[in-house]
Structures are given as C-alpha cells and as structure tokens.
Image (cartoon, helix red, strand yellow):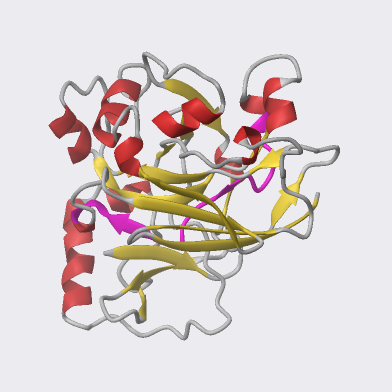
Amino acid sequence: MKLLRVGPAGAERPALLDAEGTLRDLSELVTDVDGALLADDVVIERVRAAAAAGELPVLDASGLRIGPPVARIGKVVCIGLNYHDHAAETGAEPPAEPVVFFKAADTVVGPDDTVLVPRGSVKTDWEVELAIVIGHTARYVESHEAALACVAGYAVAHDVSEREFQIERGGTWDKGKNCETFNPLGPWLVTADEVPDPQALGLRLWVNGELKQDGTTADQIFPVAEVVRYVSQFMTLYPGDVINTGTPAGVAMGQPEPKPYLRAGDVVELEIDGLGRQRQELKPA
C-alpha cells in the first residue's frame, strides 16, 4: 500500500493511493498514519481489505497539499557515509561501522514544501536518501530477518545539509543537519510488501533540472537490514521512527570548486524507484 497524509500543515488527514493512482480517504478507518497504526497489524489488514474492495471514499487531489507520510515521528536516525561512491567523492574511508547521527523530528516537512536556506548559509547541500519507517519495536535485534520484520515500509527522504555548519563550526554534525525544513519526507509510505528488495532501488536528484545524483541502494555499505539490526544495539527503535540510510555520490560537497551549493530560488527534485517524487523550491529563512 501507499499511505500518505494530505491537507494543511498540522491538519493533515490519512489517505491511501490505490493501484490505479486514485487518492482515497482513510479517515473513516484510522485517525492518522502514525506509529500506533503501523504497529497494529489488524488495522493495517483492515485498511488493505477496504482498499482492495474499493470501499474507500475518493478524495479530490487537485490543489491538495501532501504532508509527511508519518505523523508524530519519535526520532529520525541518520546513517552517514553509507554509499561506497559517496565516501569516495568526499575523500573519506568507508566506515568500519555505521556512522550514526540524528535529525530532530521537527525538521520533517512534506515532500513539496518549501526548504529554507539558513541565515548565513553558504554551503546548503542536497542528499536524496531511502528512509526506513519502523513498524514494530526493534530492541537488540539479532538477525537481518528479524530486522526486516520490524520495517513498516519505505519513503523518499531529502537529507538537506549545511556543510559549513556541519563540518567547520566546532564539532558534531548536528548543527548542519537540524535547520528547519531540512528533512522533506514522502510523498508516500510504501509498505514493505511492495518493496521486495530494498537493495535494488534507483535514487535520483536534480537541481534546476540538471541531474546531480543517480545511484542505487545496491551501493550501500551497510544494507537496510544491517542498519536496523545495528542501530537497535544502541537504542530502541519504536513504531513511527524513521531512519535515513545515506546518500549516493553527486552531492555539492563532492564536486570541484566552485562547488554548486544551493541558493534561494533553486528548485530540487528527487525520486526513488516505486517510492514517488519530491519537488522543493528554496527560499531564505
């Protein structure tokens, strides 16, 4: 299934995109798309059955904003340097273990919402990423099979980054990762049954119509199952938590001088096979 949330920011309603591409209203069945829903297999199956039977009311999609596909996200865990080609372009050695950092949940916005260039920024960068959405609690997971059983589904994430803040302003990556609007997510949460192999997904990103990133999750240093297993050794992952799994080569930081960092007025578009497409216009904060 493709689950999503539509409507004004802060007042989204749950919806489903059916196999024919028709937007359907879920509000008679569920209150929202959140961790409570994703952890409830009975209700998920009820939604699936209603969708298959064509029982869900149609929503008029014209002019309707798409919000983040998950509400009340507990935490956004991020994996750095997780693609061989991205590590190479930045001159970094492939890490022996996953590099883990956080984005605050309030950085998450809708897939087509405005992204704000921070005040004083000269190195705002783009990163298309596969996001994992957790559906069942993951705590000290022992196997890859068990790790994948904790995954509710996947989404497109844009891990916007400010490289000066991240690297040059006194340590830790968090300064360059947590600026407002720095994590567009969606348009959909695609349930795991529709993504049989998360290591076979193409990722692409364009800036002002020019293709910048064109990679595949097959190039991940630590695949999805290992990321979930590994992270669960250090923290408990709860339903509705999100993991951004890293970006392929092609970011501005990895390009020759003068590096083409983002500016207000730029338009970024990104997509992942089967998971949908985003489009953001950048404006000053």
Q: Residue at x 60, y 68 (%)?
A: 8
Q: Residue at x 68, y 14 (%)?
A: 171
**Residue at the farthest front position:** 256
Quadrant placement of the N terminus: bottom left
Q: Position of residue 126 (x, y in %)?
A: 61, 45
Task: Judge from the rendering whether residue 204 lies leftward or rightward of residue 182; answer left or right.
Answer: left
Asked if the stretch drawn in magenta spans residue 226, the answer is: no
Q: Residue at x 24, y 33 (%)?
A: 225
Q: Is residue 83 visible?
A: no
Q: Position of residue 49 (x, y in %)?
A: 16, 71
Figure check: 34 above or below 5: above
Asked if the stretch drawn in magenta spans residue 185, the answer is: yes
Figure check: 63 above or below 68: below
Q: Which residues are magenta?
A: 176-193
Q: Is residue 54 visible?
A: yes
Residue 231's quadrant in the figure? Answer: top left
